[in-house]
Amino acid sequence: MQLRPLLLAAFLVLAISAVSADAAQAVWSGLVIAENVAQPAPIPPELTKLEQTLKDLFGYNQFEVIGQSDKTLKTGQEDWLANSKYFRLQADARGENDSGYSLNLKLYKENDVLLETDANLSKSSPLVIKGPQVGSGQLLLVLVVKDDEQSNRRRHAEPANPIRTAWNRLRRAIHNVLP
Amino acid sequence: MKTFEEKWTAWLDGQLSGKELLEFEASLPDLAAAHAEKRDAQKLGSFLKEQLGAQTLSNAEFFSHQLHERIARDTQDRSGGRGIRSTWWTVPRLAWSGATALALFVITTVVLMSQHPAGEQSEYLTQILNSRVDPSANPNATISIFESKTDNKVTVLWTEGLQTLPADYAAK
């Protein structure tokens, strides 16, 4: 009977695919001061891909990272901090979902909570939060899920492919069923 | 042109005559031994004829019936099967299996895709579920959310009216 080996092979492929989806990903969180200066410094490498978007959105020509964190998420339940001298971004991951990570974010100015938000941080969509005006500049909070280059290109090329979405759901369902 | 074996058999049976007989006997290397062998063969033939006389079949009708049935079965197999071994995957079953698999695929796809309600923000974008600022320190603060129009798909949480801080707060 040739059907049994075929079914076994199909199951193995699905199982391996589901397990491979478990690869750890890193979230970069940054406290950024945006301002206009005569001689702007080069943009930090973490923000290179967002440079034009940030310039278009906020109208500043320099983006300086004053605090950052690069946290690798394995369970999707991790907490981390990005600190500067006066500000603290506290991130509390509350699990992984279909598209990314569920986060609770708190921006502290010293010991005071300036801003709190709950967000689903997508693996293909960075989050930028406009904070308070600081001197002549602007505080920005930036969160990016870092992934391998190939995955990013694929996601950007096909940002809303429903078949891929369905496949991801099926893969995640199998992953949840497997121990 | 008869072979030696054919001539030998005919000679044993006494069916060679005339010139053919003379030529054959002349070709034999030992005619005396050949005649001895011929005699032995004739003796054996006579013995067998005596011992194995025609036996009448006691169940001829049953034997004939079995034989006919076997012939009919063989004929039917040859004409119906055309030499192909029978298998569970007949054409109708193949068609039904294919249709069933296709239907299952369509149903699964529709169910999985329908889990994303129309109008809901794409899961490829970061979603802001809720946001708040400290109302006592920032009584006039407002929050809005939008998505950048660039390829980066940046989700922006835009605040207005937050208290302005001195430049010292930009320190690392």
Image (cartoon, coloured by chain):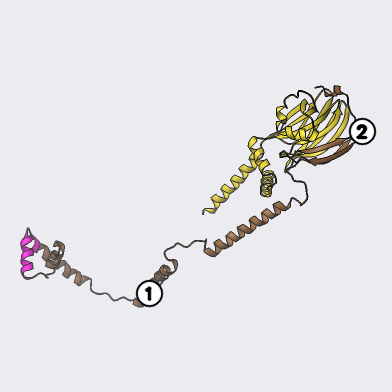
Identify the main secondary structure in magenta. helix
The chain drawn in brown is: B
Q: Colour of chain A?
A: yellow
Query: What label sits on residue B138 in the rendered view?
Result: 2
- Label 1 resides on the chain identified as B
Q: Position of residue B163 (x, y in %)?
A: 90, 30
Numbered range of the magenta stretch? B19-35
Q: Is residue A90 magenta?
A: no
Q: Position of residue B117 (x, y in %)?
A: 76, 51
Residues beneath discs 2 and 1 located on the same chain:
yes
Secondary structure under badge 1?
helix
Q: Is residue B38 left or right of residue A39?
A: left
- Label 2 resides on the chain identified as B
Q: Are circles 2 and 1 on residues that touch, CB within 8 Å? A: no
Residue that carries the numbered disc 1 in the rendered image: B68
Three-letter amino acid code of the residue under disc 2: Asn
Image quarter where the C terminus of chain B lies is: top right
Three-letter amino acid code of the residue under disc 1: His
Q: Is residue B22 magenta?
A: yes
Furthest residue in direction front, as rendered: A38
Q: Is residue B149 above or below residue A2?
A: above
Foreground: disc 2 or disc 1:
2
